[in-house]
Image (tube, rainbow, N blue to C red):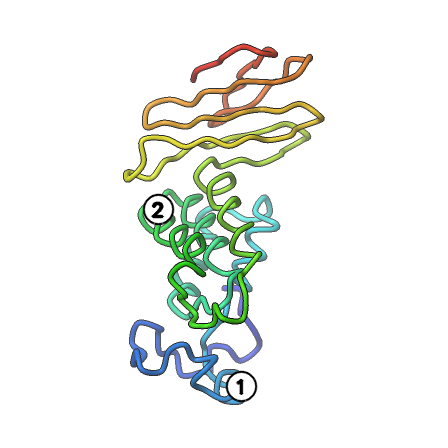
Amino acid sequence: MYLQQDGFLDKELVKVHDLDKSQRPINQKWSWDRILRSPYIKQADTLQGFYFFEDHFSREQLEKHFDFYEPFTVHESSLSPCVHSIQAATLGRMEQAYTFYLRTSRLDLDDYNKEVEEGLHITSMAGTWMSIVEGFGGMRVKDNELHFEPRIPKEWSGYSFKINFRNQILKVSIHQNETKFVLEGESPITVYVNGTAVLVEPNSLVTV
């Protein structure tokens, strides 16, 4: 286990769901001294390392750390739900991924952190895009090529997004049983869908 910090396991490891709701959000109810002595994590920290360097870790390692750290994460940061949504999708936990997606997309609309009068969270707006493209769409760039692991919440019939890749626009449309690609450009590109190479010609529809 990669520790959040030295001595983390020496803290009183009470999980977030066991906190009295009257104590939330803790960043408005507790002193910073109390917060820093607690096990509660504002946003993805150790798990952020798994996000940035995922090729260095197995999915089993990600799952182990996700299951340990998420129950101690209060998500009182606009940076938090999107990373957790992406990681949950990577683990195939679409219901959990969708819950985190809703939290990042509706952070200000529903005023989760009770601070919207201070302004909107640009990070949650970017996080909404990331949750869809990197989480549900499973988009990664590996060895200078586009890879996708398409997933879709059961609540949706479909979604789409565009990627500007090497000065060409790739439109990706994901539905419950198929994924479609349309390339706006002049040169064909190869994309990978669940590890299988797919050639996409300019201005033509490819369905997988």
Identify the residue shown where x is 71% and y is 25%: 167
Q: Nearer the viewer, residue 195 or 97?
A: 97
What amino acid is at disc 1?
A: Trp
Q: Is residue 88 above or below residue 180?
A: below
Looking at the image, the residue that sits furthest to the front is: 117
Find numbered disc 2 in the image and state the secondary structure of the residue it sits on.
Answer: loop
Quadrant assignment, res 145: top right
Dot 1: few (<14), some (14–19), or many (≥20) neighbours within 10 Å?
few
Q: Which residue was labeled with disc 2? A: 93
Q: Is residue 35 above or below residue 87?
A: below
Q: Nearer the viewer, residue 42 or 38?
A: 42
Dot 2: few (<14), some (14–19), or many (≥20) neighbours within 10 Å?
some
Q: Which residue was labeled with disc 1? A: 32
Which quadrant of the rendered structure holds the C terminus? top left
Contact? badges 2 and 1 (CB < 8 Å): no
Identify the residue shown where x is 51% and y is 30%: 148
Left of 166 or right of it: where is 26?
left
Q: Which x, y percent locates residue 201? A: 59, 11
Q: Which x, y percent locates residue 98? A: 36, 48
Find numbered disc 1 in the image and state the secondary structure of the residue it sits on.
Answer: helix
What amino acid is at disc 2?
A: Arg
Tell me the CA gap for discs 2 and 1: 33 Å
Nearest to N terminus: mark 2 or mark 1: 1
Identify the residue shown where x is 54% and y is 66%: 119
